[in-house]
Amino acid sequence: MSYEEASKKLEEIIEKLENGNLPMSEAVTLFEEGEHLAKECYQHLNKAKGKLTIIKDELDKLTEIDE
């Protein structure tokens, strides 16, 4: 699942939980699913951060060569 899909689904779960009109068992199930989706989003963001760090390091090296 992409970051965008996971993030959207997580937002939907948060809205349902915030309404508070759910049976406890359904709320717990949604909370667990939300926790899983939050971890998935975090992994996507960490991966993107790693890629951006590599690109930034490469650009820094290039600017050092040009100076």
Image: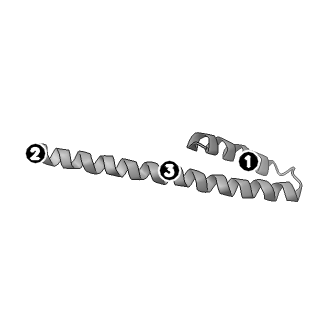
Q: Nearer the viewer, residue 21 or 34?
A: 34
Taking the spot 53% from the left edge, 54% from the top edge, the residue there is 43
Mark 2: which amino acid? Glu
Mark 1, secondary structure of its residue = helix
User: From mark 3 to mark 2, how far is it between C-alphas?
Assistant: 33 Å
The residue to which callout 2 is attached is: 67
- Bin the neighbour count of mark 3 within 10 Å (Cα to Cα): few under 14, some 14-19, many 20 and up: few
Give the residue displayed 22% in from the left and 48% down from the top.
60
Left or right: where 23 falls relative to 7: right
Q: Residue furthest right?
A: 23
Mark pair 1, 3: CA separation: 20 Å
Q: Earlier in the sequence, mark 3 or mark 2?
A: 3
Q: Amino acid at mark 3?
A: Leu
Amino acid at dot 1: Ile
Residue at numbered disc 3: 45
Looking at the image, is mark 1 or mark 2 earlier in the sequence? 1
Q: Name the secondary structure under disc 3.
A: helix
Query: Is 31 on the left or on the right of 5, as rendered?
Result: right
**Going by the picture, which residue comes out furthest to the front?**
1
Task: Please state, as top left, top right, bottom left or bottom right, where the C terminus lies in the image.
Answer: top left
Q: CA distance from mark 1 to mark 2?
A: 51 Å
Q: Residue shown at 45%/48% (left/top)?
A: 48
Say which of 61 and 15 sits in front: 61
Q: Is residue 57 left or right of residue 42?
A: left
In this image, 25 relative to 52: left or right?
right
Q: Which residue is mark 1?
A: 13
Image quarter for residue 38?
bottom right
